[in-house]
Amino acid sequence: MFIKPDYNLKSIYDINLDELKVKGIKALLFDLDSTLMGSRTGCYTEKTLKWLENVKKDFFVGVVSNNNNPLYIEKVTSCTDFPIVFRAHKPDTRVTKEFMKKNGLTPQTTCFVGDRPLTDVLCGKNLGCTTILVDSITADIEKPVVRFVRWLERCSVKKS
Ligand SMILES: [Mg+2]
């Protein structure tokens, strides 16, 4: 099975917000770990926070995470000022669908952004959202074994 995200980018900073606006996108839903912050770090960098502030000027911003560690959830929630849902069980769509409904989002106007083709992109696609695959935000410091697993997973991504 091949997965084809609408956009395949190096990082969140490469997202063309103007283009999304023109396409009618009003909401950006992000995966958390390795997309908005280093895996299990529990905090956004200054650079990411600044970028998100800019995104929030024109888009609804939300986070959908599969993380289910209570302490981690508490830590992230305390430093996040936009809606966030944990234990999402992506690629299953039920939790995300509820989250979208609660926040008045429709698939036609929502773009799903994440670093994992088989969880984030698949979930977004199954919901009918626009999808963006990004490389891990900490790709440059990840261990070879992690990079190898990522490479394997990306064999599922259709190149063009
Ligand atoms: Mg992730």
Image (tube, rainbow, N blue to C red):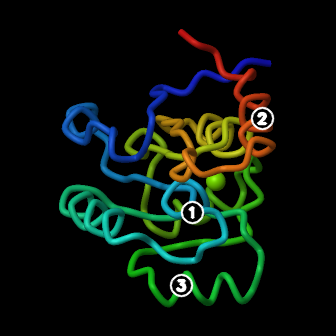
Residue 148 screen position, x and y as percent: 77, 35
45 lies above or below 121: below
Left or right: 7, with 14 as reference point: right
Left or right: 29, with 72 as reference point: left
Q: What distance separates the C-alpha of mark 1 from that of mark 3? A: 16 Å
Q: Which residue is mark 3?
A: 77
Residue labelled 1 has its Cβ within 8 Å of some atom of ligand 1: no
Q: Which residue is mark 1?
A: 38
31 lies above or below 150: below
Earlier in the chain: of badge 1 and badge 3, it is: 1
Residue 133 screen position, x and y as percent: 53, 36
Residue beneath the point at 37% across and 53% down: 27
Mark 1: which secondary structure? loop
Mark 3: which secondary structure? helix
Of 76 and 129, which appears nearest the observer?
Answer: 76
To which quarter of the image does residue 156 belong?
top right
Earlier in the chain: of badge 2 and badge 3, it is: 3
Estimate how packed mark 2 is, as few (under 14), some (14 to 19) or many (20 or more) residues with alpha carbons within 10 Å.
few
Q: Which residue is mark 2?
A: 148
Residue beneath the point at 50% across and 76% down: 43
Residue beneath the point at 45% across and 85% down: 79
Question: Could you tell me which quadrant the N terminus lies in?
Answer: top right
Of 39 and 26, which appears nearest the observer?
Answer: 39
110 lies above or below 51: above
Of 142 and 31, which appears nearest the observer?
Answer: 142
Amino acid under label 3?
A: Thr
